[in-house]
Image: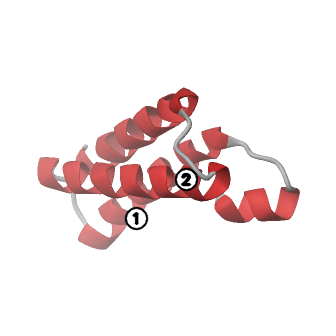
Amino acid sequence: MYGFYELAGFRFPLLGVGIGVLTGFGAKLLYKGTENTLGIISGVIAMMAVVGTLYLMYGTFPILSILSVVVSVFLAYRIASG
């Protein structure tokens, strides 16, 4: 998401959804299974990644981008746990 921002020159915070999807699939692939704990861990990792990336892009955390964080965490959890 930050690489897209640097290359394109504009901010698109909904790319955080992609971070959640990739985190969920990566956890599921590397763990070779699904479990509730795996979903929680991948959700936390996705949340930290999206919040950190948004902070790098904006210099602060924009409250309007909370939707991107929530959807990212939800998708990472659902993909990895189930």
Report x, y in % for residue 1. 64, 56
Instruction: State left or right for residue 60 relative to residue 3.
Output: left
The disc placed on residue 55 is 2
Report x, y in % for residue 81. 23, 47
Instruction: Name the colour scheme.
Output: secondary structure
Q: In this view of the protein, which residue sits in the foreground, 16 or 52?
A: 52
Instruction: State left or right for residue 25 relative to residue 40.
Output: right
Q: Residue at x 31, y 40 (%)?
A: 78
Alpha carbon of mark 1 to alpha carbon of mark 2: how far?
Answer: 23 Å
Q: Residue at x 40, y 40 (%)?
A: 75
Mark before the other along the chain sequence, 1 or 2:
1
Question: Label 2 sits on what residue type?
Answer: Tyr
**Looking at this rendering, what residue extends furthest in the front direction?**
59
Question: Label 1 sits on what residue type?
Answer: Gly
For residue 45, above or below residue 36: below
Residue annotated with mark 1 = 26
Q: Residue at x 82, y 48 (%)?
A: 10
